[in-house]
Amino acid sequence: MASPRPQTNDRPQPRLYLVTPAAGDVKALAAELAAALEAAEIAAVLLRLPEGDDRSLINRIKVIAPVVQKSGAALILDGHPGIVARGGADGAHLDGVTAYEAAAGDLQPDRIAGAGGLNTRHDAMLVAEAGADYVMFGEPDADNERPSFDAVVERISWWSEVFEAPCVGYAASIDEIAPLAQAGADFVAIGDFVFSDPRGIAAAIADAASRLTLAETPA
């Protein structure tokens, strides 16, 4: 079994986990990330990469890595565990139990191995028991489908009450941030909606961070 979460009322403030669009125009993305990281504290950035050979992807990562890491955030690749070290990233997000089990041993303990695509409670428990640095709930699948929001909140609430491994709740809109944080997510993932916000990325990130504060549990 995964380790139980200690019973305490001193749960740390949830933190933001920023998910990028696929890094097509890498210089433009780097500029957006610099603005986002300046606007609020972000714990980690999940970098989505376009199709390409390893060398071209590594070159993209090397543009993004210093921008992210100088703020103190971790740069995590969406998949591609084999090029994490060569690109200077901090870890990889692995989709499903099989992908996690195949790659985690090569990443840990020096780099982060997180897990998503966990369709059942059993899957989440398996990767946590195997040492996943975090589990993610609620992200869209390859067909851009996700569980109902109520189901995501229920899964995070269950996890946060029982297990010690951190969990990331995926917010598909600004209004989902506070409920996910209130349910017990250690991190709240935000993505496309902040990059497309007409107010600009900095204002969107600041707004997102304010939703975490509003979600604090009263003492």
Image (tube, rainbow, N blue to C red):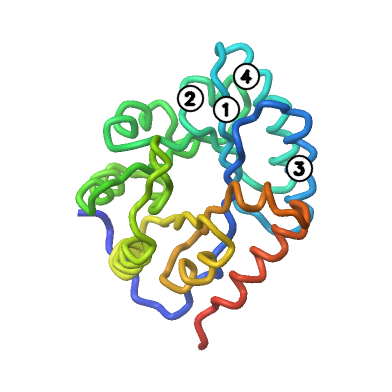
Q: Residue at x 68, y 48 (%)?
A: 196
* Image mark for residue 49: 1
- Give percent across and percent down for residue 105: 36, 29
Q: Amino acid at mark 1?
A: Leu
Mark 2 touches mark 1? (CB < 8 Å): yes
Q: Amino acid at mark 2?
A: His
Question: Pointer 2: residues within 10 angstroms few (<14), some, or many (20+)?
Answer: some
* Circle 4 or circle 1, nearest the eye: 1
Q: Earlier in the sequence, mark 3 or mark 4?
A: 3
Q: Nearer the viewer, residue 39 or 89?
A: 39
Distance from disc 2 to disc 4, alpha carbons, whole Å, reads: 10 Å
- Give percent across and percent down for residue 10: 48, 77
- Is residue 181 positioned above or below 113 on the image? below
SS for dot 2: loop
* Image mark for residue 32: 3
Q: Residue at x 34, y 42 (%)?
A: 117
Q: Which residue is mark 4?
A: 58
* Image mark for residue 80: 2
Q: For residue 130, which quarter of the picture?
A: top left
SS for dot 4: helix
Q: Residue at x 54, y 76 (%)?
A: 215
Q: Earlier in the sequence, mark 2 or mark 1?
A: 1
